[in-house]
Image: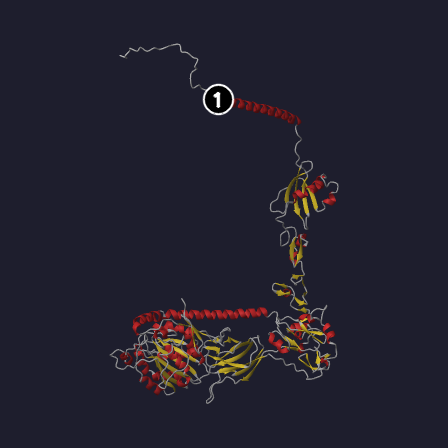
Amino acid sequence: MLFPIYEMSKCHTLCTWALCFPLDLHSEHAHVSIKPHHSPVNRQVREEVWSLSETLVRDLRGEAVTFIALIFEMYQRVAVLLQILLLLRRGAHSEKEECLKTIVNSCADCIRSGPSCAWCKQPNFTKTGEPDATRCDTESLLLEKGCQKSNIISPKSHHIRVEDRPLSKATPPRQPVQLRPQEVKLALRPGLPYTFQFSFKRAEDYPVDLYYLMDLSYSMRDDLLKVKQLGRDLWTALKKTTSRARIGFGAFVDKTVLPFTDTNVKKLEKPCPEEEQYCQPPFGYRHVLSLTDEYNLFNEMVASQYISGNLDPPEGSLDAIMQAAVCGDKIGWGNSTRLLVLTTDAGFHMAGDGKLGSILLPNDCECHLDKNLMYSKSNKMDYPSVGQVARKLAENNIQPIFAVTSNMEQIYRKLKEIIPKSEVGVLSEDSSNVVTLIDNAYKSLSSNVIVTHEALPQHVTVTYTSNCANGHQPSPRGTCDNVGLDREVEFNVTVKAEQCIDETSFFIGALGFTEKMKVTLTTQCKCECDEPQNSNHSHCNGHGRITCGMCSCNAGYLGQRCECHVGDKDESHLRAACQRDNGTECSGLGECVCGVCQCHASEDGKTIYGKYCECDDKSCEVHHNKLCGGQGKCDCGKCKCDQGYQGSACQCKISTEGCLPTDANQVCYGRGDCVCNMCQCKGGYKSPFCKECPGCPSPCAEAASCIECLGFQTGPFSKNCTESCSHIKHKMVDKLTVKKHTSKKNCKERDVENCWMVFSMEEREGFNSYMAEIQTERECPEPPNVAAIIAGAFAGVALIGILILAIIKGIIYASELKEFRKFEKEKQKSTWSQENAMFTAATTTVQNPFFSGE
């Protein structure tokens, strides 16, 4: 499902189906609000819209605001975590400064290259063929290269207090001073954070402006009656706080379109029940009374107000707050503590709800009060988002107090978490406790100091640290709680410019207080070298003036030191002097000026140098993603390692400590080489010390000949045993014992006399070096029994002969049996089919013809 997105014009607020985000990346606080999205409605679908409104706007209101607060809390935690990570990263990188210069042709280019870059203005600092970019490096490296500290230019950040009046109480006609200093001017080195301090102290008898903004929907009729009676009490409470108090009044209901208000003509004239005698038509917001110090006028104006009505429970509270915040000239806000008291018994509509009434135009955060002091855009612009309201309240130093009924307390407490410098109080059923509620809320707000700033210039960041007088630990949020009157608290402000910018300014102050500190910001991106303006300086061979260590030649002269006069020498000879082995002029990386290569500056920060610009300080081996392993310097393609390191990339420590086992005197047990303080084993031996060789064959068979000559003076090496078997030391033992968990290998091999030799082999330090223990007695077989062998041979021959005869007899029998069976088969096939014709029987039979058979 695709969710619609639109941008609140002029307020820079991005809204989606669920949230509205103010796009103010320079604000200390982020604000979001829930915005349900629906299709436009009309009169024919009134009932469906009402049902949908009830479901999404009323039933889910508490859950929605809770969700907002969770997102805001997550945002704050992530922001603090990112700041901590950035500080840790900055601390990790601060151990080793690095100047990542790019194209550097002047001192100003060098200073702009990075916060750690410095420029050496010392004459004769560069060698022949070295570019002027060599003058740009970190201060420590320039000192190593021979530049005197007095000749190093590295601008430092600083600040000046332009206006610094001391903190003081109000002494009419002078206003109190609660913020010191009032104006500072910062000169910052780009990329380096700079911290300065300012103080804040709450002054006694500071003016208070209180604007009472009341919900006049029908459910607030009892509360309106009570407020009409409490005007004197409210004024008395204000006068106890300050002698310079002012009070104003405004009212609101809701937008007068469906589904927020019944648009029936009669209901628009009188939205209240019939029995209600006094009832005014519904309206969005009306400014009733500008801030005044005449409380009688406040009582009169409140007394003239009547109740009104609408349909749905949420009201147009945010519309009213927005207009009260941005219409400062109509409300009459002064240089004072500005309080806005909102009294209501219902929730609030917010950005996106206007679409239910076919209001699609986003709120523009501008003042739209007509000549009758009515909000003229109520039915034309959508409700503002919570983020928009929070932003405008902060910009105008207005502190809201939400005086709500108990059933709405949790919703507005979640809203308080999003809007800074706000308070929530629970009204009684008839608002009889509103005076006490406002007094308590004011004391809580005024004692809570939150430092913030207006929109910052591009590429500038500001963070705060609090040093609260009540003993709290410094906090990165710039907040101090429970700050009493005449108690001074201090804040550290850290400002950082990411790059060179034009002079600009911004304001810092405490939320809810109109006093601001102006901060004018400039960046240190130029060099002040202060050389004498001598047009014929000796360093330039009398043909130019020197600027920050570099020669600026007079007309007709060229060269790094103006050493070449145009036309004095043959051009072909000069160019030949810039070519190595008839190659490219200055290796294609520089220009030939008077027979001397002036190398270009590289865009990737490397310095090109050499007689023919053939060298640079970046084309060396890299180890662990660091040039020369971070333990050396790259000089013309080769690493020059720091002391204690070696290798083509300075990757190795000059040490064998890591290769020496605790139980041996040779590195790597003599079976490998120690490279970079690590063993590189030979012949299949295993790290870390080449002690074991899991894949190597058993040494038993290979050592058998040496064991035979060493232990028994026989075998193929018996004549030169000492030379052939020098790698094996041996010891004769009576009985060889087998031990578990040992590196010895037990062996059993035959010698030339066919005896079993029993011995053990244990590796010594070194390659193919062993210690052997040889058992004195060999295991030889007993001599053979000749008689038994001869008897056995004869018996075997006889048995074999008998066996052969039996086999022959069997073959003959089988053959004869086969022939006999064949004869019997053919005999059966030879039977006669008739008698012999020559045969005459012995009897003759004659039949009587006259015999009838009876």
Q: Indicate the position of residue 624 as horizontal and vertical percent values.
A: 61, 63
- Asked whether, in this view, residue 40 is left or right of residue 572, the answer is left
Q: Amino acid at mark 1?
A: Glu
Query: In which quadrant of the rendered view does residue 723 lie?
Result: top right
* x 66%, y 67%: residue: 633
* x 57%, y 25%: residue: 807
Vertical comparison of 836 with 581: above or below: above
Residue under label 1, please give it: 826
- Asked whether, in this view, residue 488 is left or right of residue 678, the answer is left
Residue at the left extreme, as displayed? 275
Vertical comparison of 244 with 133: above or below: below
Q: Give 15 or 657, whichever is nearer the viewer.
A: 15
Q: Residues within 10 Å of mark 1 (few under 14, many from 20)?
A: few
Q: Give 830 or 294, whichever is nearer the viewer.
A: 830
Q: Give 828 or 254, whichever is nearer the viewer.
A: 828
Residue 661 visible in this rendered orientation of the protein = no
Name the quarter where the N terminus is drawn.
bottom left
Q: Indicate the position of residue 472 as horizontal and vertical percent values.
A: 49, 73
Q: Indicate the position of residue 669 as horizontal and vertical percent values.
A: 66, 52
Query: In which quadrant of the rendered view does residue 67 lie?
Result: bottom left
Q: Indicate the position of residue 233 as horizontal and vertical percent values.
A: 35, 83
Q: Give 49 or 663, whichever is nearer the viewer.
A: 49
Vertical comparison of 476 with 376: above or below: above
Vertical comparison of 34 with 689: above or below: below
What secondary structure is found at the residue carrying circle 1? helix
Name the quarter where the C terminus is drawn.
top left
Residue 502 visible in this rendered orientation of the protein = yes
Residue at the bottom extreme, as displayed? 173
